[in-house]
Amino acid sequence: METYYPILYLLVSFAIAMVSTLIVFKWGHSRVKMESRLTGVWVNESQTMRILLHHINSVFQGDVVWINSVKSNHQHLLGSRMIKDLVLKRIAQGSNGTYVDLQNGKEMPFRVWFQGKGRLKIVVMKKANGREMVLKEEQWYQL
C-alpha cells in the first residue's frame, strides 16, 4: 500500500500542472478575444452616430464614421476621434479611457463595460470634490 503513494502524488502533481497550464492559457487569450469583440463599428442607442473602434498595441481609439443628423452642420464631425486611449481590463472591471465631447472638444474620463454579446455600456465621468460624478451613460450596439 505504501508503494502507491509516490504514484498518487505524481498523478496529482501532473493534474495540478495541467489545470494550471490551461488556466494561464485561457487568461492569456481572453484579452485577445475581448479585443476582437470590441473591434468594429458601433452605433449609439438613438441611432444617430456610428464609431469605428480599432486598436493598436491593445490601446483602442474610436473615430466617428457616420452621423444621422437633420442639421447639416454636423458633417464636419466625421472622422473626429471620440474615444482615445481605451485600455481593456478584465471582463468584470470597467475599462478606462478618454471620451472627447464632439460639441466642445472637452476630454473626460470614461469607463466601458461589456453588457453581453454586441453591447457596451459607456459611462462618462467628471471629478468633483475628489469623487467621480456620472455625466452621461449610454448603451452602444455592434453592427
Image (cartoon, grey):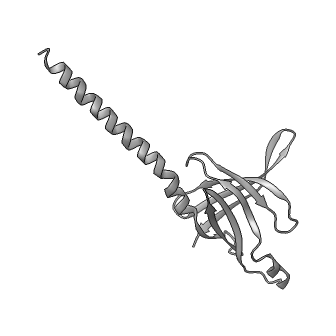
**Residue 77 against residue 106 in the figure, above or below:** below
Residue at left offset 57%, top offset 56%: 115
Name the image quarter holding the C terminus.
bottom right
Residue at left offset 64%, top offset 66%: 53
**Residue 72 against residue 18 in the figure, above or below:** below
**Picture coordinates of residue 129 (x, y %)?**
87, 39
Residue 47's quadrant in the figure?
bottom right
Residue at left offset 61%, top offset 60%: 120
Residue farthest along the top direction in this orientation: 2
Q: Nearer the viewer, residue 133 or 143?
A: 143
**Residue 112 against residue 22 in the figure, above or below:** below
Total marks shown come to 0
**Picture coordinates of residue 141 (x, y %)?**
60, 67
Residue 16 shown left or right of residue 138 in the figure: left
Name the image quarter holding the N terminus.
top left
Residue farthest along the left direction in this orientation: 1
Residue 98's quadrant in the figure?
bottom right
Residue farthest along the front direction in this orientation: 57
Residue 94 shown left or right of residue 24 in the figure: right
Residue 78 shown left or right of residue 106 in the figure: left
**Picture coordinates of residue 23 (x, y %)?**
41, 42
Residue at left offset 71%, top offset 54%: 97
